Amino acid sequence: MRPAWLAEFLAFSPGPAEEVRLFFAPGRVNLLGEHLDYNGGTVLPAAIQVGTWCAIRPRAERRWRVGSHTESAVVEAAWPAIRVPRAAHGFAQYPFGVVVMLEAAGIAVPGADCYFWGTVPQGAGLSSSASLEVVTAYALTAVAGQTPDRVTLARIAQQAENAYVGVPCGLMDQLTVALGQAGHALLIPLPTLAVRAVPVPHAQDWALVIVDSRKPHHLVASPYRQRRQECEAALARLQQAGWPIQALADIAPEALPQALAIVRDPVLQRRVRHVVSEQQRTLRAAEVLAAGDFVAFGQLMNASHRSLQADYDVTGPELDTLAEAAWAVPGCVGSRMTGAGFGGSTIAWVARDAVDAFQAQVRATYAARFGREPGFLVAELGDGVHEVAWTNEEEIPCASS
Ligand code: GLA
C-alpha cells in the first residue's frame, strides 16, 4: 500500500517512486526578543512540531513545477523566466524565489517537481513562509548533492522573502527553522550568530500553549516596514551625534536616558526604549529558562507584551485580549504576543494540569469580545529542517484527505 502523500505526489509527478525524496521544515515560535533581529539584538525562538513537507523529484531540464495539497493550480516556470517575480504565481513565489536566490549565491540546482503539505496555520505568525522557503532550499540543494551550511540556507531563504516576495523580514524565522533542536530554544545573537541551544526543562509539568487570534497578519501591508524605518531613523540620529553603535540593541541600558534625549521624537523614543528593554529581558530569559524558573520567565513575557503594546505599538485589541485573558488564569505564569504582531498568535506557559481550564477561559473571554474562537496548539519543540527517510508506512498528517 502506498502512503496517501506518495499517491498524491505521483498524480502530480508521474514516474518511479524511488526517485522521490521527502523533506520537512518546522514552523517556529519566538519565546522572547521581539523585533530585535533587525535591530542587531538577541532573540530566543524555538522550532515547533507543525511545519511543511516537500516531496521532490529532480527533472532533466531547468524547469520548476510546484503544487500543493491546499492549492488546486500547479505553477511552473523555466530558467531564465523564473527570475522575474510575478504576484500571479501566488504561493509558488516562495519556492521560485529560493531557486533564484540559490543561483545568485552560486549554488546551481536542478529543475524539479516539488509538492508541499503544510500544518502551520496560515496567518498565525508561526512562520509558515520561512518553513516553506527553508524546506525548498534544503530539498533542492540535497537533490543537487550539495550541503551548504544551515546559516547560509537561512540567509538565502531570507533573501527570497526580501528581494523576490518583497517582505522586509529579518533573519530570525529562517534561522530557527533551519537550526531548531528538539526540546530546546535557540539563543541567537544576530550580530555574531553564535547560536546557543537552551534546554527547556520540566516539559512534563509545563506546556507552551500557542493561541491563534485568527486575525491574519500580512507583513507586506502591515506597519512592519514602518517599524523598521523608525528604528533606522533613531539609529541615524544617534550615529550622527557620534555614538559608535551599529544597531539600536547596542545601546547599554544605563545609556538609555541619554539616547532618548538625542532621539527626541516621542515615537522614536518609544521604539528605542522597547529595543533596549527587550534586549535585557531576552538575555535574562535565557538564564531563567535554563534554570527552570518558569515564574520568572513568565514575568519577563508579560513585561515584553506590555512593551510591545505601549512602546512598539504592534499588539492590537485581539492580542491584548488574549494576553490579558491568559494572565487571569490560575496556572498560567506568563503570556505575550509572538512574532511580528498586528494579529497572529500569543504564547503562554501553563501548568500542564491547568491547560484545559486555560483554553476554556481564554476561549470564552475572546469569543465574548470578538464573536469568534481562537485556535489552540500545545507546542512541542522540534528539530530544524531535515530529510524524512520514508517507507511505505510513512504518512504526512494532512495528506490523507
Ligand atoms: C517577523 C519577521 C522576523 C522578526 C519578527 C519580529 O516574524 O519575519 O524577522 O522581525 O517578525 O520579532
Image: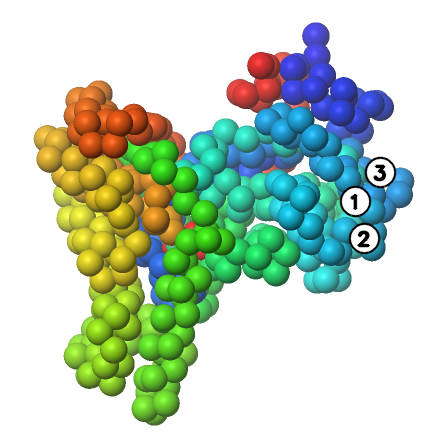
Q: CA distance from mark 3 to mark 2?
A: 17 Å
Q: Nearer the viewer, residue 194 or 70?
A: 70
Query: How crowded is the residue under tag 3: few (<14 C-alpha within 10 Å), some, or many (20+)?
Result: few
The N terminus lies in quadrant: top right
Q: Position of residue 371 (x, y in %)?
A: 26, 27
Amino acid on which the number 2 mark rests in the picture: Ala
The C terminus lies in quadrant: top right
Could you say whether the residue bearing mark 2 is in a helix, strand or loop? helix
Q: Mark number for residue 77?
A: 1
In the image, 368: left or right of 53?
left
Q: CA distance from mark 2 to mark 1?
A: 7 Å
Residue 209 versus residue 131 in the image, above or below: above
The residue beneath circle 2 is 81
Can the viewer see residue 353 in this picture? no
Could you say whether the residue bearing mark 1 is in a helix, strand or loop? strand
Residue 55 versus residue 156 in the image, above or below: above
**Residue in the image at 59% along x and 38% along y:** 386
Q: Quadrant of residue 100?
A: bottom right
Q: Position of residue 107 (x, y in %)?
A: 75, 57
The residue beneath circle 3 is 59
